[in-house]
Amino acid sequence: MSSRPELQAPPEIFYDDNEARKYTSSSRIIKIQSELTERALELLALPEDGVPRLLLDIGCGSGLSGETLTENGHEWIGLDISDSMLNVALEREVEGDVLLGDMGQGLGFRSGVIDGAISISAIQWLCNADKSSHEPRARLKAFFGSLYRCLARGARAVFQVYPENIDQRVLILNYAMRAGFAGGVVVDFPHSAKKRKEYLVLTCGPPSINTSVPNGKGVDGESCSEDDESSGDEENQTVCVSDRHRPRKKQRITKKGKGREWILKKKEQMRRRGNVVPADTKYTARKRKARF
Ligand SMILES: C[S@@+](CC[C@H](N)C(=O)[O-])C[C@H]1O[C@@H](n2cnc3c(N)ncnc32)[C@H](O)[C@@H]1O
Protein backbone atom coordinates (compact mmCIF):
# COMPACT_ATOMS: atom_id res chain seq x y z
CA MET A 1 0.00 0.00 0.00
CA SER A 2 1.19 3.56 -0.73
CA SER A 3 2.83 5.39 2.15
CA ARG A 4 1.08 8.62 1.16
CA PRO A 5 -1.71 9.21 3.69
CA GLU A 6 -3.81 11.02 1.04
CA LEU A 7 -4.10 7.76 -0.90
CA GLN A 8 -5.17 5.69 2.09
CA ALA A 9 -8.33 7.37 3.40
CA PRO A 10 -10.07 10.77 3.57
CA PRO A 11 -8.28 13.08 6.05
CA GLU A 12 -11.03 13.03 8.68
CA ILE A 13 -10.81 9.23 8.70
CA PHE A 14 -7.06 8.83 8.32
CA TYR A 15 -6.42 11.25 11.21
CA ASP A 16 -8.57 9.38 13.73
CA ASP A 17 -7.99 9.36 17.52
CA ASN A 18 -5.25 6.76 17.24
CA GLU A 19 -3.34 8.50 14.41
CA ALA A 20 -3.78 11.93 16.01
CA ARG A 21 -2.17 10.73 19.24
CA LYS A 22 0.62 8.89 17.41
CA TYR A 23 1.27 11.98 15.26
CA THR A 24 1.58 14.35 18.17
CA SER A 25 3.73 12.11 20.35
CA SER A 26 6.40 11.53 17.70
CA SER A 27 9.44 13.68 18.46
CA ARG A 28 10.49 13.36 14.79
CA ILE A 29 7.16 14.79 13.57
CA ILE A 30 7.23 17.56 16.19
CA LYS A 31 10.71 18.59 14.99
CA ILE A 32 9.77 18.44 11.30
CA GLN A 33 6.53 20.45 11.77
CA SER A 34 8.42 23.07 13.74
CA GLU A 35 11.23 23.39 11.15
CA LEU A 36 8.80 23.56 8.23
CA THR A 37 6.78 26.25 10.01
CA GLU A 38 9.91 28.31 10.78
CA ARG A 39 10.79 28.21 7.08
CA ALA A 40 7.21 29.07 6.07
CA LEU A 41 7.35 32.08 8.40
CA GLU A 42 10.65 33.16 6.84
CA LEU A 43 9.07 32.96 3.36
CA LEU A 44 6.00 34.84 4.63
CA ALA A 45 8.38 37.80 5.04
CA LEU A 46 6.28 39.67 7.60
CA PRO A 47 7.56 43.11 8.59
CA GLU A 48 10.11 42.85 11.40
CA ASP A 49 8.50 45.48 13.61
CA GLY A 50 7.58 43.31 16.60
CA VAL A 51 3.85 43.76 15.90
CA PRO A 52 1.91 40.47 16.28
CA ARG A 53 0.08 39.49 13.10
CA LEU A 54 -3.16 37.53 12.65
CA LEU A 55 -2.25 34.39 10.70
CA LEU A 56 -4.17 31.40 9.38
CA ASP A 57 -2.87 27.85 9.74
CA ILE A 58 -4.72 25.75 7.18
CA GLY A 59 -4.78 22.07 8.10
CA CYS A 60 -3.54 23.05 11.57
CA GLY A 61 -3.97 19.51 12.94
CA SER A 62 -2.91 19.14 16.53
CA GLY A 63 -1.37 22.61 16.58
CA LEU A 64 2.32 21.70 16.26
CA SER A 65 2.77 24.25 13.47
CA GLY A 66 0.59 26.74 15.36
CA GLU A 67 2.88 26.51 18.37
CA THR A 68 5.76 27.80 16.26
CA LEU A 69 3.56 30.74 15.20
CA THR A 70 2.88 31.49 18.89
CA GLU A 71 6.59 31.24 19.73
CA ASN A 72 7.22 33.84 17.05
CA GLY A 73 4.76 36.20 18.71
CA HIS A 74 1.77 35.87 16.35
CA GLU A 75 -1.94 35.28 16.86
CA TRP A 76 -3.41 32.50 14.76
CA ILE A 77 -6.58 30.77 13.71
CA GLY A 78 -6.31 27.12 12.71
CA LEU A 79 -8.67 25.16 10.47
CA ASP A 80 -8.77 21.40 10.21
CA ILE A 81 -11.18 18.74 8.99
CA SER A 82 -10.20 16.13 11.60
CA ASP A 83 -11.94 16.48 14.96
CA SER A 84 -9.45 13.99 16.46
CA MET A 85 -6.53 16.25 15.52
CA LEU A 86 -8.34 19.32 16.86
CA ASN A 87 -9.16 17.49 20.13
CA VAL A 88 -5.45 16.90 20.64
CA ALA A 89 -4.82 20.60 19.91
CA LEU A 90 -7.38 21.53 22.61
CA GLU A 91 -5.86 19.06 25.09
CA ARG A 92 -2.47 20.61 24.44
CA GLU A 93 -4.03 24.03 25.15
CA VAL A 94 -2.65 25.71 22.04
CA GLU A 95 -2.88 29.50 22.02
CA GLY A 96 -4.65 29.77 18.66
CA ASP A 97 -8.39 29.47 18.00
CA VAL A 98 -9.16 26.26 16.16
CA LEU A 99 -12.08 25.59 13.80
CA LEU A 100 -13.47 22.34 12.44
CA GLY A 101 -13.95 22.77 8.70
CA ASP A 102 -13.08 21.64 5.21
CA MET A 103 -10.81 24.02 3.30
CA GLY A 104 -12.26 22.62 0.05
CA GLN A 105 -15.55 24.30 0.90
CA GLY A 106 -13.92 27.70 1.19
CA LEU A 107 -12.94 29.80 4.20
CA GLY A 108 -15.60 31.90 5.84
CA PHE A 109 -13.56 34.89 7.00
CA ARG A 110 -14.31 38.55 6.41
CA SER A 111 -12.53 40.26 3.53
CA GLY A 112 -9.00 41.51 4.04
CA VAL A 113 -8.73 40.72 7.77
CA ILE A 114 -5.92 38.13 7.70
CA ASP A 115 -2.25 39.22 7.62
CA GLY A 116 -0.82 35.96 6.26
CA ALA A 117 -1.49 32.25 5.91
CA ILE A 118 0.59 29.13 6.23
CA SER A 119 -0.15 25.49 5.66
CA ILE A 120 2.16 22.60 6.43
CA SER A 121 1.71 19.34 4.54
CA ALA A 122 -2.03 19.76 3.94
CA ILE A 123 -2.93 21.37 0.59
CA GLN A 124 -2.18 18.26 -1.51
CA TRP A 125 -5.21 16.61 0.12
CA LEU A 126 -7.39 18.86 -2.04
CA CYS A 127 -6.28 17.01 -5.17
CA ASN A 128 -8.10 13.85 -4.08
CA ALA A 129 -11.77 13.17 -4.58
CA ASP A 130 -12.79 11.37 -1.40
CA LYS A 131 -16.54 11.52 -2.00
CA SER A 132 -18.62 11.24 -5.16
CA SER A 133 -19.55 14.91 -4.62
CA HIS A 134 -15.87 15.96 -4.55
CA GLU A 135 -14.45 17.64 -7.62
CA PRO A 136 -10.81 18.62 -6.91
CA ARG A 137 -10.91 21.57 -9.34
CA ALA A 138 -14.05 23.01 -7.75
CA ARG A 139 -12.53 22.52 -4.28
CA LEU A 140 -9.25 24.21 -5.24
CA LYS A 141 -11.24 27.10 -6.75
CA ALA A 142 -13.35 27.52 -3.60
CA PHE A 143 -10.28 27.34 -1.38
CA PHE A 144 -8.01 29.77 -3.23
CA GLY A 145 -10.87 32.19 -4.03
CA SER A 146 -11.91 32.46 -0.38
CA LEU A 147 -8.29 32.66 0.79
CA TYR A 148 -7.59 35.51 -1.61
CA ARG A 149 -10.60 37.44 -0.33
CA CYS A 150 -9.78 37.17 3.37
CA LEU A 151 -6.10 38.15 3.02
CA ALA A 152 -5.05 41.79 3.28
CA ARG A 153 -3.73 43.17 -0.04
CA GLY A 154 0.00 42.48 -0.32
CA ALA A 155 -0.20 39.66 2.28
CA ARG A 156 1.44 36.33 1.56
CA ALA A 157 0.38 32.72 1.86
CA VAL A 158 3.09 30.06 2.16
CA PHE A 159 2.15 26.42 1.77
CA GLN A 160 4.57 23.57 2.27
CA VAL A 161 3.23 20.86 -0.02
CA TYR A 162 3.90 17.29 -1.08
CA PRO A 163 2.36 17.11 -4.55
CA GLU A 164 2.20 13.55 -5.82
CA ASN A 165 3.47 14.52 -9.27
CA ILE A 166 4.06 17.47 -11.60
CA ASP A 167 0.43 17.51 -12.74
CA GLN A 168 -0.74 18.05 -9.16
CA ARG A 169 1.72 20.89 -8.65
CA VAL A 170 0.59 22.57 -11.85
CA LEU A 171 -3.08 22.08 -10.94
CA ILE A 172 -2.61 23.67 -7.50
CA LEU A 173 -0.61 26.58 -8.94
CA ASN A 174 -3.13 27.16 -11.72
CA TYR A 175 -5.98 27.55 -9.29
CA ALA A 176 -3.93 29.87 -7.08
CA MET A 177 -3.16 32.08 -10.09
CA ARG A 178 -6.77 32.04 -11.28
CA ALA A 179 -7.83 33.34 -7.87
CA GLY A 180 -5.53 36.32 -8.43
CA PHE A 181 -2.38 35.31 -6.54
CA ALA A 182 1.09 36.04 -7.90
CA GLY A 183 4.05 33.89 -6.96
CA GLY A 184 5.50 30.45 -7.57
CA VAL A 185 7.25 27.47 -6.04
CA VAL A 186 10.39 27.57 -3.89
CA VAL A 187 12.28 24.28 -3.59
CA ASP A 188 14.77 23.86 -0.75
CA PHE A 189 17.55 21.30 -1.20
CA PRO A 190 16.34 20.24 -4.66
CA HIS A 191 19.10 17.65 -5.08
CA SER A 192 18.48 15.81 -1.84
CA ALA A 193 15.91 13.03 -1.74
CA LYS A 194 15.46 13.38 2.03
CA LYS A 195 15.73 17.12 2.59
CA ARG A 196 13.92 18.33 -0.53
CA LYS A 197 10.97 20.50 0.47
CA GLU A 198 8.58 22.43 -1.70
CA TYR A 199 6.79 25.67 -0.76
CA LEU A 200 4.14 27.53 -2.68
CA VAL A 201 4.79 31.23 -2.06
CA LEU A 202 1.80 33.35 -3.04
CA THR A 203 1.14 37.06 -2.76
CA CYS A 204 -2.26 38.60 -2.71
CA GLY A 205 -2.60 41.33 -5.31
CA PRO A 206 -1.03 42.22 -8.64
CA PRO A 207 2.69 41.50 -9.25
CA SER A 208 5.16 43.96 -7.79
CA ILE A 209 8.69 43.82 -6.49
CA ASN A 210 7.33 42.07 -3.35
CA THR A 211 5.74 39.26 -5.32
CA SER A 212 9.02 37.93 -6.74
CA VAL A 213 9.67 34.40 -5.54
CA PRO A 214 12.55 34.02 -3.03
CA ASN A 215 15.43 31.60 -3.63
CA GLY A 216 15.36 28.05 -2.36
CA LYS A 217 17.93 26.81 0.17
CA GLY A 218 20.71 24.37 -0.75
CA VAL A 219 20.46 25.23 -4.41
CA ASP A 220 24.01 26.18 -5.45
CA GLY A 221 26.67 24.57 -3.37
CA GLU A 222 24.99 25.47 -0.05
CA SER A 223 25.90 22.54 2.14
CA CYS A 224 23.42 19.82 2.73
CA SER A 225 24.33 17.44 5.57
CA GLU A 226 23.00 14.20 4.17
CA ASP A 227 24.01 12.27 1.05
CA ASP A 228 23.49 14.51 -1.94
CA GLU A 229 21.48 11.97 -3.79
CA SER A 230 19.30 13.44 -6.53
CA SER A 231 15.59 13.11 -5.98
CA GLY A 232 15.18 12.15 -9.63
CA ASP A 233 12.59 14.90 -9.85
CA GLU A 234 12.84 17.71 -12.35
CA GLU A 235 15.54 20.31 -11.88
CA ASN A 236 13.43 23.09 -10.49
CA GLN A 237 14.69 25.19 -7.65
CA THR A 238 12.52 28.22 -7.91
CA VAL A 239 9.69 27.99 -10.36
CA CYS A 240 7.92 31.21 -11.17
CA VAL A 241 4.64 31.02 -12.95
CA SER A 242 2.68 33.63 -14.77
CA ASP A 243 -0.46 35.02 -13.26
CA ARG A 244 -3.55 36.56 -14.66
CA HIS A 245 -2.44 40.14 -13.97
CA ARG A 246 0.69 39.85 -16.05
CA PRO A 247 0.44 41.84 -19.31
CA ARG A 248 0.55 39.81 -22.51
CA LYS A 249 3.89 39.58 -24.26
CA LYS A 250 4.19 42.18 -26.99
CA GLN A 251 4.55 40.78 -30.48
CA ARG A 252 8.12 41.18 -31.64
CA ILE A 253 8.32 43.59 -34.55
CA THR A 254 11.70 44.13 -36.19
CA LYS A 255 12.94 47.47 -37.49
CA LYS A 256 11.78 46.40 -40.90
CA GLY A 257 8.22 45.83 -39.65
CA LYS A 258 6.54 42.44 -39.78
CA GLY A 259 8.23 41.57 -43.07
CA ARG A 260 7.16 40.96 -46.69
CA GLU A 261 6.46 37.29 -46.16
CA TRP A 262 4.03 38.00 -43.31
CA ILE A 263 2.20 40.66 -45.33
CA LEU A 264 1.91 38.41 -48.39
CA LYS A 265 0.53 35.63 -46.21
CA LYS A 266 -2.05 37.98 -44.66
CA LYS A 267 -3.09 39.30 -48.08
CA GLU A 268 -3.55 35.73 -49.32
CA GLN A 269 -5.72 34.95 -46.27
CA MET A 270 -7.87 38.03 -46.99
CA ARG A 271 -8.30 36.97 -50.64
CA ARG A 272 -9.41 33.49 -49.55
CA ARG A 273 -12.05 35.13 -47.39
CA GLY A 274 -13.36 36.94 -50.46
CA ASN A 275 -11.98 40.40 -49.69
CA VAL A 276 -10.72 42.74 -52.41
CA VAL A 277 -6.99 43.01 -51.87
CA PRO A 278 -4.51 45.06 -54.00
CA ALA A 279 -2.25 42.97 -56.22
CA ASP A 280 1.22 42.04 -54.96
CA THR A 281 3.92 44.21 -56.52
CA LYS A 282 7.57 45.01 -55.87
CA TYR A 283 6.31 47.80 -53.60
CA THR A 284 4.33 45.47 -51.33
CA ALA A 285 5.69 45.64 -47.76
CA ARG A 286 8.26 48.23 -48.73
CA LYS A 287 8.88 50.53 -45.78
CA ARG A 288 7.57 54.08 -46.29
CA LYS A 289 9.79 57.00 -45.50
CA ALA A 290 9.01 58.42 -42.07
CA ARG A 291 8.27 61.86 -43.52
CA PHE A 292 8.46 63.63 -46.83
C1 LIG B 1 0.26 16.41 7.98
S1 LIG B 1 -1.06 17.06 8.90
C2 LIG B 1 -0.39 18.62 9.37
C3 LIG B 1 -0.69 18.94 10.78
C4 LIG B 1 -0.33 20.28 11.34
N1 LIG B 1 0.44 21.14 10.51
C5 LIG B 1 0.26 20.09 12.71
O1 LIG B 1 1.18 20.82 13.04
O2 LIG B 1 -0.19 19.25 13.47
C6 LIG B 1 -2.21 17.55 7.65
C7 LIG B 1 -3.51 18.07 8.20
O3 LIG B 1 -4.28 18.56 7.14
C8 LIG B 1 -5.64 18.33 7.48
N2 LIG B 1 -6.50 18.37 6.29
C9 LIG B 1 -6.47 17.57 5.20
N3 LIG B 1 -7.45 17.91 4.33
C10 LIG B 1 -8.11 18.95 4.89
C11 LIG B 1 -9.23 19.73 4.47
N4 LIG B 1 -9.86 19.48 3.33
N5 LIG B 1 -9.61 20.76 5.25
C12 LIG B 1 -8.99 21.02 6.43
N6 LIG B 1 -7.94 20.29 6.89
C13 LIG B 1 -7.50 19.27 6.12
C14 LIG B 1 -5.61 16.94 8.11
O4 LIG B 1 -6.76 16.66 8.88
C15 LIG B 1 -4.32 17.02 8.92
O5 LIG B 1 -4.55 17.40 10.24
Image (tube, rainbow, N blue to C red):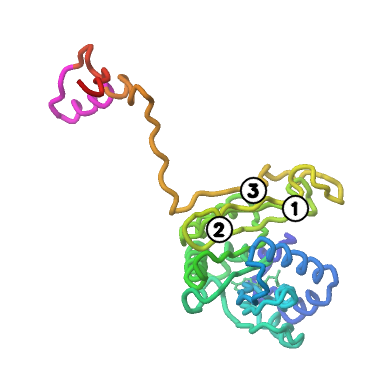
Q: Secondary structure at mark 3?
A: strand
Sequence order check, earlier mark of 3 and 1 = 1
In the image, residue 80 sits, relative to residue 264, either above or below, namely: below
* Residue 58 relative to residue 21: left or right: left
Q: Furthest residue to the left? A: 276
| Residue 198 visible here | yes
* Residue 154 relative to residue 32: left or right: left
Label 3 sits on residue = 238
Q: Residue at x 49, y 67 (%)?
A: 153
Q: Secondary structure at mark 1?
A: loop
Q: CA distance from mark 1 to mark 2?
A: 19 Å
Label 1 sits on residue = 196
* Residue 234 relative to residue 210: left or right: right
In the image, residue 267 sits, relative to residue 60, either above or below, namely: above
Seen from the viewer's position, the closer of residues 165 and 157 is: 157
Q: Amino acid at mark 3?
A: Thr
Q: Which residues are magenta?
A: 264-279
Question: Would the CB of label 3 be found within 8 Å of ligand 1?
Answer: no
**Cβ–Cβ below 8 Å for labels 3 and 2?**
no
